[in-house]
Amino acid sequence: MKKYKNKTTNVQNQNNSEYSGKEELRDLEEGLENYNNDIVIKIAKGLGITHKSNISEGFAEFGAGTGALAEIWRDKFNINPICIEIDSSLIQILRTKSFTTYENLNQVNTLLSFVYTSNVLEHIEDDLSALKEIKEKIKPGGALAIYVPALPFLYTDMDKKVGHYRRYTRKELIQKVSTAGFTVREIYYNDSLGVIATLIVKVLGYKNKAGLGSPKSIVLYDKIIYPISKILDRLILRKVIGKNLFLFAVNEQ
């Protein structure tokens, strides 16, 4: 897999092998227990995976970070994802957690049945090339699940701090996934109430040490705001608006 060139040094260094927003990543992954569980549950539903599914191989996470989602798959679904992660220190964390981990997809010596990627594509400048390479590793009939930040007008200092190139529109995400060769089966918004929360961050500013963006504010969001957002999403809003987008696609070729 290519080492996707990233021109902003606050995400990766010049050889693109180190993620420098690890403090923010750790706070987000460790403080969002409800949020992360919900992401996994929704990805499982979109991929047609249940607790009774017997998946022992061919299941991978592209951009696994510290392994927060991978651990949920292992604990709740008895699935050990193959973890793809370019950052050397995060690779060590993943291996300490006993996940099979590779720096890139080309190191995986078999075609995959399922690949999911959560809050990763927005960090890659050439996201279309990344999607094309993911497709090359998914067997015909295999599936892809994507979770990304939505709505460009929500781009804030927090996006900049953690190295986001973009927030996606529905049209842009569908177009790129389709251009990469996938057939899109479903797309919907997630976290409708998060739109308001993100707008507040945009107005008041992002501070990861205190105030909005701090570990305490992240836990508050996870415990109180996100559960309310889930209810609103289920009622109707996931068709209309949300802080993020889920997309599910199939490799039919």
Image (cartoon, grey):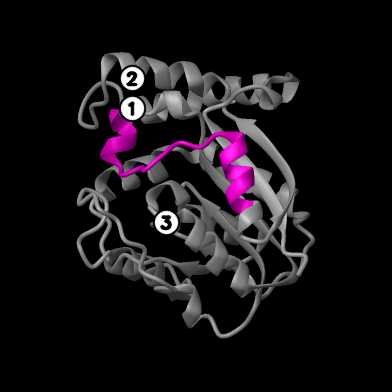
Q: Give neighbour class at mark 2: few <14, some 14-19, many 20+ (Cα, 10 Å).
A: some
Q: Relative to the observer, which residue lies in front, 25 or 19?
A: 19
The reply to whether residue 233 is in sight is yes
**Residue 35 placement (x, y as % from top left):** 53, 37
Q: Earlier in the sequence, mark 3 or mark 2?
A: 3
Mark 2, secondary structure of its residue? helix
Residue 104 occupies quadrant: bottom left
Question: In terms of image quadrants, where is residue 52?
Answer: bottom right
Which of 65/215 is in front?
65
The alpha-carbon separation of the residues under discs 3 and 1 comes to 21 Å
Q: Which range of residues does the magenta coloring cover? A: 156-177
Q: Quadrant of the C terminus?
A: bottom right
* Identity of the residue drawn at 38% across and 29% down: 155
Instruction: Look at 26% across and 38% down and name the residue there.
Output: 161
Question: Is 26 placed above or below 226 here?
Answer: below
User: Disc 1 marks which amino acid?
Assistant: Thr
Q: Earlier in the sequence, mark 3 or mark 1?
A: 3
Q: In the image, what residue occupies the spot 38% across and 30% down?
A: 218
Evaluate if marks 2 and 1 touch, with contact meaning CB atoms under 8 Å apart. yes
Mark carried by residue 156: 1
Task: Check residue 202 in the rendering and tell me which mark sits there, or answer none.
Answer: 2
Marks 2 and 1, Cα distance to the nearest angstrom?
5 Å
Point out residue 246 in the picture as x, y percentages from the top left corner: 62, 41
Provide the residue designation for mark 3. Answer: 126
Q: Amino acid at mark 3?
A: Asp
In front: label 3 or label 2:
3
